[in-house]
Image (tube, helix red, strand yellow):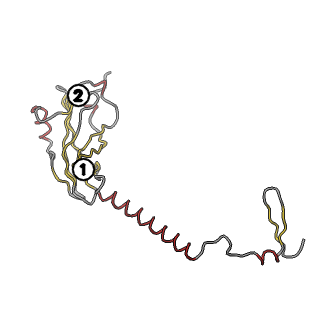
Amino acid sequence: MKPGAVLKQGTGVKQWVDDDVWQQLDPHAGGLSRRQRRRAAAAATAAAVVLVAGFAIDRSGLVRAQITYDPDTGLQSSATVNPKVFTQQVPVKNNGWTTVRVTGIGHDGPGLRLVGPTDTGELKQASEMGGRQPPFDLRPGQTAIMVVAYRVTDCAAVPAGPLLIPVRVERPWGTETISLSSEVPMDQACPPQH
């Protein structure tokens, strides 16, 4: 082996390359030209700007409302055994940068019927818990506590675990529904059978 020779290994082939051969090779071969490097840098910068702008627009609430369940708010809930009606305070927070118009809350579900304005007895129970009734505007960073009331029609059909409570907000292109997970007092409305 010559001094300065370098061993190159490929797929099962060993080959020695002399220093003379290495010196004859162009070190810039296969590299990007100055113009190509500028184009690549401009494309990478544009991609980064698009990603940051997309993230900012998403978080702003301009395209998709940023409504969340606010667990930091104290909650109250109650249930009556006859008729099986329970109410739940739902703290809703606007984490976006724009004001949204809340137009509704809740819907019927398996074994549950949403109590509406014509159900005066149940609404009295719901109104005793306070809370805002839609429609109303929710400003950025603001939390509003809404009350939802359900009549249990079939305890066996009520799903176990947290109940998803839909909140409807008005958008320029239509209504958007955001489902919030809330722990509701199902054990009070549907006590376990022993």
Read off the residue under disc 2. Answer: 152
Residue type, numbered disc 1: Trp
Residue type, numbered disc 2: Val
* Front-lying residue, 177 or 12: 12
Q: Is residue 169 above or below residue 62?
A: above
Q: Position of residue 133 (x, y in %)?
A: 14, 45
Determine which quarter of the picture holds residue 114.
top left
Q: Residues within 10 Å of mark 2 (few under 14, many from 20)?
A: many
Q: Mark 1 or 2 closer to N-term?
A: 2
Q: Residue at x 41, y 63 (%)?
A: 50
Left or right relative to 117: residue 46: right
Q: Is residue 15 above or below residue 132?
A: below
Circles 1 and 2: CB atoms closer than 8 Å: no
Q: CA distance from mark 1 to mark 2?
A: 34 Å
Determine which quarter of the picture holds residue 158.
top left
Left or right relative to 135: residue 180: right
Q: Residue at x 78, y 56 (%)?
A: 11
* Front-lying residue, 90 or 173: 173
* Front-lying residue, 183 or 92: 92
Under circle 1, the secondary element is: loop
Q: Quadrant of the N terminus?
A: bottom right
* Front-lying residue, 125 or 59: 59
Left or right relative to 21: residue 94: left
Q: Residue at x 31, y 42 (%)?
A: 181
Q: Is residue 179 above or below residue 66?
A: above
Under circle 2, the secondary element is: strand
Q: Position of residue 147 (x, y in %)?
A: 18, 42
Q: Position of residue 123 (x, y in %)?
A: 12, 36
Please state which of the two labelled residues, at mark 1 or mark 2, is closer to the viewer.
1
Q: Residue at x 30, y 54 (%)?
A: 63
**Residue 173, numbered label:** 1
